Image (cartoon, helix red, strand yellow):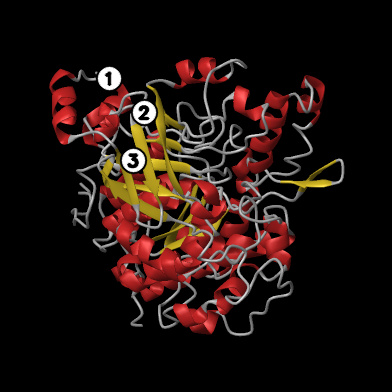
Amino acid sequence: MARKHLSDLRSQRWYAASGIRGFAHRQRTQQFGLRREEFMGKPVIGIVNTWSEMNACHAHLRQRAEAVKRGVWQAGGYPVELPALSMAEIMVKPTTMLYRNFLAMEVEELLRCHPIDGCVLLGGCDKSTPGMLMGAFAVDLPTVFCPAGPMSNGRYKGTITGAGTHTKKYFDMLRRGEIDGQEWINLESPMTRTVGTCNTMGTASTMTSIVDAMGLSITGASSIPAVDSGHERMASACGTLAVERVWDDLKPSQLLTRQSFLNGLVAYMALGGSTNAAIHLIAMAGRLGIELGLDDMAEMSRRIPVLTNLFPSGNYLMEDFYFAGGLKALLTKVKDELDLSCRTVEGCMLGEALEGAECWNDDVIRDLSNPVVSLEKGRTLVVLRGNLAPNGAVLKSSAADPKFLRHEGPALVFDHPDAMMQALDDADFDVSEDTVLVLRNAGPVGAPGMPEWGNLPIPKSLLKKGVKDIVRICDGRMSGTHYGTCVLHVAPEAAVGGPLSLLKTGDIVVLDVEAGRLDMKVSEEELARRRETMKPTARIYDRSFTALYQRSVTQADEGCDFDFLTGPRNLPEPEIY
């Protein structure tokens, strides 16, 4: 790769100018106590940090930013830390998904308006990974992603426990009366022992692993536990890499291809990853002008079975995955499905980055001949279409009860989660195992923000009979740590007039996973009559970021990006006068 000259760096427009503006930029930088020699003539690396005291997943990122700075200084660069929105998945209401595009906009503008030549992105909690990368892709500066890393394994009374997955499991036990209120309280702290992202294969590790497989991280970095000393060393190496990539001028638009994204899909399916990735990957690819859709994911899921024995599809946690060899070991087991010629941010091809990788536990990371869930029994992502979801819906069939993969039953429809919870918590509520539970108005516009309401609770009356799964349908999302026969991301959503808005309690719903169908047995004539009398159900905001979101957000099958931000669009550099 051709090396850049100092005069080619965009930061030199700020620092090298001889007029009053250049004087002011140098003057204000020295105001930090820096000697002129410490920043002049060096590439400026922006360290975009999503640390927050509201986000335990990112609680260690202040220290990791210091490690990144060490690497930048060592490589001859000038590091600057830029704080960005930290979206704590559990704390932010109504959902972090409402603010993913906000973070993308913030990262884009932070990088564009400052004298930045390249960046290291510090994130990992669910929406922070796609949000930061969407923003970085729009500016198209050399970018290295530094994943926050998963928390350490949890245990309760000798039983391995993972964040999210076991929360759901124990909550159902509480509702069944199998544990009492005090034990519910006792469970709080031992399940989340350290800082870091969820230690199951939830959305956080799904997204960081996919980005890793795409070549935007140091290969294998996504598997390193947050509190491992190796994580800090990795962060330092990210700083060094960022400086090198600036001199090489290796930008995301040059590094990433459609094949890079397909490599990410291979990892996604083998990991048994979160359904949320289906939305984020479409949005990320869209920022680069790369064609990627639900059908690409459906095709890959038909080829690659679940190979990682991790909750919620298996029996282990992310720390076990790391000690078994991590993502590099997994990728070696599916390397025949990968394009090993794809470039990575390390400056080599993916095949070179995987050289010497080994698996140390074949039960945690399985071979293609011995999957955790065979393709015949379930897949990471099934795409469904029909008169209930003409533009698509998704289901993780590998985490569903196989007996429901071909199912027909009466719909029980709710328009709001509060009404749903009140009904389902009634121990005498009349509902059967055949019932198809539906929650609508949970989509991008309707909720707003498409919250993780889709793992609808099993009615208490069924839980007491030992029922642990039923068919559930929602135009919202579900946590990647959860499980069950949950049809999600129904598009178009009910709030914008999608067919889900026409469904009534008692209508017969047909789910056929093998055929890829989701339908309601209602005639077109009856649907037309219902549409004539349908009234808008979404609450439309007239101010705040939420108003912008509702006006501009696309549907789930399009990535839920803003319509005015999709696609690669060249913007001029900021004027300096």
* Position of residue 310 in the picture relative to residue 249 (left or right): right
Q: Are marks 1 and 2 in contact (CB under 8 Å)?
A: yes
Mark 1 secondary-structure assignment: loop
Name the quadrant of the N terminus: bottom left
Q: Is residue 219 above or below residue 541?
A: below
Task: Answer yes or no: is residue 354 visible.
Answer: yes
Foreground of the two, 225 or 536? 536
* Residue at horizontal 68 percent and vertical 26 percent from the top: 464
- Of residue 75 and residue 22, the one placed in the foreground of this image is 75
Q: Nearer the viewer, residue 302 or 518?
A: 518
Query: Does label 1 or label 2 sit earlier along the sequence?
Result: 2
Q: Residue at x 13, y 31 (%)?
A: 525
Location of mark 1 (residue): 537
The image shows residue 576 at horizontal and vertical percentages of 22, 49
Q: Amino acid at mark 3?
A: Val
Q: Residue at x 33, y 75 (%)?
A: 5
Which amino acid, mark 2?
A: Arg
The residues tagged by marks 1 and 2 sit, at their Cα atoms, a distance apart of 10 Å
Q: Earlier in the sequence, mark 1 or mark 3?
A: 3
Q: Secondary structure at mark 3?
A: strand
